[in-house]
Image: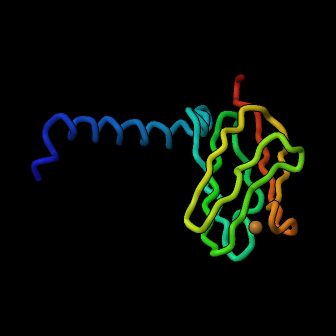
Amino acid sequence: MRRVNPFSRRLFWQGLGASLALVTTRRAVSTHEGTHVVDVKVSGFEFAPAAVEIIAGDTVVWVNHDIAPHTATAVEGDWDTGTLEKGEEARIIFKEPGLHRYFCAYHPHMTGEIRVRSKPGG
Ligand SMILES: [Cu+2]
């Protein structure tokens, strides 16, 4: 395949070496280097998973799979995805550690929570 030129092949092996190193030194290496994106599916009038645990700086993405519109609206009122129609998504970056409970503004029985832990070593 033309795409596998010597350069990208070398990158591939470097990547493999890095992941092997991660496995062997797992205890010493943080599982959260850089930021992560966590998906929450909004489907069947539920947030799935309803409880999510992330590290400060991570992003949560809500994707609405229902025909009904939904929101993810913070109970504390400090963030809100706004209305998500079917197929739409919204992302929110959580920078501060803490527990964020949220609900759907259209269907308040739909609830979820995001637990944001502090960044290791910071
Ligand atoms: Cu809803």
Give the vertical position of 115 relative to 41 (above or below).
above
> Is residue 117 rendered to the left or right of residue 2?
right
State the image coordinates of residue 94 (x, y, percent, origin top left).
71, 38
Q: Residue at x 18, y 34 (%)?
A: 7
Q: Residue furthest left?
A: 2
State the image coordinates of residue 58 (x, y, percent, origin top left).
64, 39
Q: Residue at x 65, y 48 (%)?
A: 60
Q: In the image, ligand 1 is in what quadrant? A: bottom right
Q: Residue furthest right?
A: 76
Q: Residue at x 58, y 42 (%)?
A: 36
Q: Nearer the viewer, residue 6 or 94?
A: 94
> Is residue 65 rendered to the left or right of residue 103?
left
State the image coordinates of residue 71 (x, y, percent, origin top left).
73, 58
Q: How many marks?
A: 0
Give the vertical position of 18 relative to 71 (above or below).
above
State the image coordinates of residue 44 (x, y, percent, origin top left).
70, 77
**Image quarter of residue 29:** top right
Q: Residue at x 64, y 56 (%)?
A: 62
> Is residue 66 rendered to the left or right of residue 71?
left
**Which quarter of the rendering shows the C terminus?**
top right
Give the vertical position of 10 relative to 54 (above or below).
above
Q: Nearer the viewer, residue 82 or 33?
A: 82
